[in-house]
Image (spheres, rainbow, N blue to C red):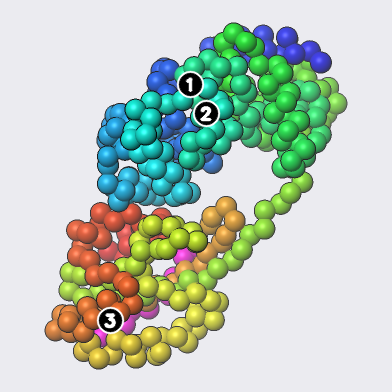
């Protein structure tokens, strides 16, 4: 196994080809941690504006720790995987109030932080503190699998352990942070998933997949995600400048974010059979206009595919008191336009509101 050549060529390639990203020009663990949490399951192009906004709004760990949770979630709006934002805030508060505002300086202790898994802990440990512990993400799986000819399923427990052991075996004791950056960047720019430019690859001379014509077959990823389809019938209820919203509870997608009252089920979405029943609940408010949006919104998540329709109820302002009672009984909230704008909402709701204007 030609590991020395592999390490040498990557460290040689990296400074000549790396992207100029703001979190690479620092050893500040707060900045590194912030970037790693934002970039989890997120492309750099999408995550970079969020990173810049967070760092501008919360330049220090203390600034983030003392910020209102609603504000932290609002700033995350549209990025998805919202548990990351909740964990980010909880971790900042824990470090600020219980650890003197300091990050642990080794992998084992970093791993104990909320929202920090093996990948993020290794990134902080190596980038900020130069601890020789390997970062293993999708890019690293791909580079190692192709170069060393490893056909173990990367989604299996055995596969993850095998790749982590190999990565930790070859990481240099000196410049471990730079090596981790190099192998990840190599996977992102050179050894890409589809149609990599192997002819101009600095590792082709000793790459197993290149010489065996197996570039398209490695890495092996046998497990397929099971996609759940869900059908949401949303009710957008408006009374003058006010709108009915509800805060999503724990145990489902978009926890802590705000959307509208809804009923879930394919039968609701297909024929609006629930409309008469729903109207009975609010008919006593007075004059009501019903606007049915015939456009079905399709929203794709990692494990779910959501089909949503929106029905808008415009309630006469004279019936405000009755509407408020109904809202209170159903644990909803009645908010004005300014508050609605400031609430953290799922991207699906944002899309509907932007198109509904």
Q: Look at mark 3 in the image and give the residue it sits on.
A: 326
Residue at 30% over, 79% down: 329
Total count of labels? 3
Q: Is residue 218 magenta?
A: no
Disc 2 residue crowd, few under 14, some 14–19, many 20+, Cα 10 Å: few
Depicted 339 relative to depicted 34: above or below: below
Mark 1, secondary structure of its residue:
loop
* Residue at far front of view: 98
For the N terminus, which image quadrant?
top right
Disc 1 residue crowd, few under 14, some 14–19, many 20+, Cα 10 Å: some
Depicted 214 relative to depicted 288: above or below: above
For the C terminus, which image quadrant?
bottom left
Q: Is residue 290 magenta?
A: yes
Q: Look at mark 2 in the image and give the residue it sits on.
A: 109
- Disc 2/disc 3 C-alpha distance (Å): 49 Å
CB atoms of marks 2 and 3 within 8 Å: no
Give the percent coordinates (x, y) of residue 275. 41, 86
Give the percent coordinates (x, y) of residue 135. 60, 26
Give the percent coordinates (x, y) of residue 247. 35, 63
Mark seen at residue 105: 1
Q: Nearer the viewer, residue 230 or 217?
A: 230
Q: Nearer the viewer, residue 283 or 134?
A: 134
CB atoms of marks 2 and 1 within 8 Å: yes
The magenta stretch is 288-298
Depicted 171 relative to depicted 230: above or below: above
Give the mark nearer the N terminus: 3 vs 1: 1
């Amino acid at each position: 196994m030609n590991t020395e050549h592999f390490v040498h060529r990557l460290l040689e390639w990296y400074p000549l080809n790396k992207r100029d990203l703001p979190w690479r020009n620092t050893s500040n663990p707060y900045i590194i941690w912030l970037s790693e949490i934002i970039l989890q399951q997120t492309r750099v192009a999408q995550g970079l504006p969020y990173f810049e906004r967070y760092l501008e709004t919360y330049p220090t760990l203390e600034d983030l720790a003392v910020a209102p949770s609603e504000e932290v979630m609002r700033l995350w709006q549209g990025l998805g995987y919202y548990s990351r934002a909740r964990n980010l805030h909880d971790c900042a508060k824990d470090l600020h109030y219980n650890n003197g505002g300091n990050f642990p300086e080794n992998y084992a202790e970093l791993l104990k932080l909320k929202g920090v898994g093996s990948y993020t802990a290794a990134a902080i440990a190596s980038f900020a503190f130069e601890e020789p512990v390997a970062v293993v993400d999708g890019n690293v799986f791909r580079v190692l699998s192709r170069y060393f000819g490893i056909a173990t399923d990367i989604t299996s427990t055995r596969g993850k352990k095998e790749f982590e052991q190999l990565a930790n075996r070859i990481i240099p004791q000196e410049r471990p942070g730079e090596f981790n950056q190099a192998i990840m960047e190599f996977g992102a720019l050179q050894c890409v998933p589809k149609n990599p430019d192997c002819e101009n690859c600095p590792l082709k001379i000793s790459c197993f997949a290149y010489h065996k014509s197996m570039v398209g077959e490695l890495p092996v990823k046998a497990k397929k995600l099971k996609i759940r389809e869900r059908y949401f019938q949303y009710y957008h209820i408006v009374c003058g400048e006010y709108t009915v919203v509800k805060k999503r509870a724990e145990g489902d997608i978009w926890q802590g974010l705000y959307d509208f009252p809804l009923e879930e089920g394919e039968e609701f979405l297909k024929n609006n059979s629930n409309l008469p029943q729903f109207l009975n609940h609010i008919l006593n408010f007075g004059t009501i206009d019903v606007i049915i949006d015939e456009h079905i919104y399709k929203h794709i998540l990692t494990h779910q595919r959501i089909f949503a329709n929106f029905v808008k109820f415009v309630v006469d302002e004279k019936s405000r008191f009755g509407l408020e009672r109904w809202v209170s009984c159903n644990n909803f909230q009645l908010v004005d336009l300014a508050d609605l704008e400031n609430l953290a909402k799922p991207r699906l709701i944002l899309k509907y509101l932007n198109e509904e204007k």
